[in-house]
């Protein structure tokens, strides 16, 4: 089961106090589509224990996080595993489940952690985790390139119609 390979931590120590976000600093995260809500200059209560999954207890969205952060909501569970490969493998499994709900309730303890998890050998887990990590890294790079091209396009359009 998912709960047998992941540990969870409540987010209260990492909740941002000031929601007037800045353009730089420590990212403030949510597990839903927005992901990075903004940045804060707060230096206390930063989650910097290593890779984790942030899981929104209400929407069932989850994100893999590999950098220090703060969170906005107490509805987030911070999930960790004994090792990075197992964390990545379980994250991809949870994304595969395509969890969703119409109910506004806390789901992780009641339902998600009880999902059956197929756990292959350590070597297979390592291979899968590395493959998905490489794909995720490549997708981030391509997304950044796309965003830069979009900025370049906007600049050229502004120059063209001055």
Image (spheres, helix red, strand yellow):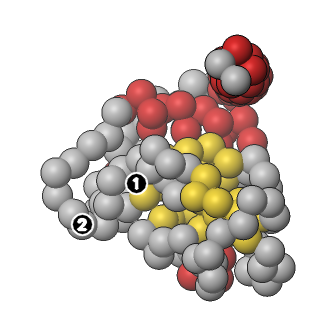
Q: Secondary structure at mark 2?
A: loop
Which residue does the image show at 60% across and 32% down from the upper left?
89
Depth check: give the residue in front, 2 or 14: 14
Compared to 54, does 76 lie above or below? below
Location of residue 104 by image quarter = bottom left
Residue 156: give x, y in percent of width and height: 73, 17
Residue 4 visible in the picture: no
Name the residue furthest left: 102
Above or below 74: residue 1: above
Q: Which mark is residue 97?
A: none
- Which element carries disc 1, helix, strand or loop? helix
Residue that mark 2 sits on:
105
Label 1 belongs to which residue? Answer: 113
Question: Would residue 5 appear left or right of 128 to someone viewing this image?
Answer: left
Q: Nearer the viewer, mark 2 or mark 1?
A: 2
Determine the image quadrant of residue 43: bottom right
Q: Residue at x 48, y 72 (%)?
A: 73
Q: CA distance from mark 2 to mark 1?
A: 15 Å
Q: Quadrant for residue 71, please give it.
A: bottom right
Q: In the rendering, at what x and y percent does residue 19 appear?
A: 58, 76
Quarter of the image where the C terminus is located: top right
Q: Residues within 10 Å of mark 2 (few under 14, many from 20)?
A: few
**Residue under the image location 46 percent in, 44 percent down:** 33
Q: Residues within 10 Å of mark 1 (few under 14, many from 20)?
A: some
**What residue sits 62% from the left and 75% below the top?**
20
- Judged from this view, the residue extending furthest toward the front is 162
> In the image, 6: left or right of 60?
right
Q: Horizontal placement of 9 versus 39: left or right?
A: left
Residue 34 location, x and y as percent?
Answer: 50, 48
């Amino acid at each position: 089961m998912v709960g047998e390979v992941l540990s969870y931590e409540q987010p209260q120590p990492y909740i941002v106090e000031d929601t007037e976000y800045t353009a730089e600093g420590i990212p403030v995260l949510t597990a839903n589509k927005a992901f990075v809500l903004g940045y804060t200059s707060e230096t206390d209560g930063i989650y910097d224990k290593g890779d984790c999954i942030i899981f929104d207890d209400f929407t069932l969205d989850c994100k893999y996080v590999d950098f220090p952060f703060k969170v906005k909501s107490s509805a987030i569970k911070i999930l960790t595993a004994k090792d990075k490969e197992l964390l990545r493998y379980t994250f991809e499994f949870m994304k595969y489940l395509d969890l969703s709900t119409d109910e506004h309730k806390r789901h992780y303890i009641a339902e998600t952690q009880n999902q059956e998890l197929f756990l292959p050998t350590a070597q297979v887990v390592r291979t899968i985790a590395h493959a998905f990590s490489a794909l995720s890294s490549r997708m981030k790079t391509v997304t950044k390139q796309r965003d830069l091209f979009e900025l370049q396009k906007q600049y050229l359009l502004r120059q063209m119609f001055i």
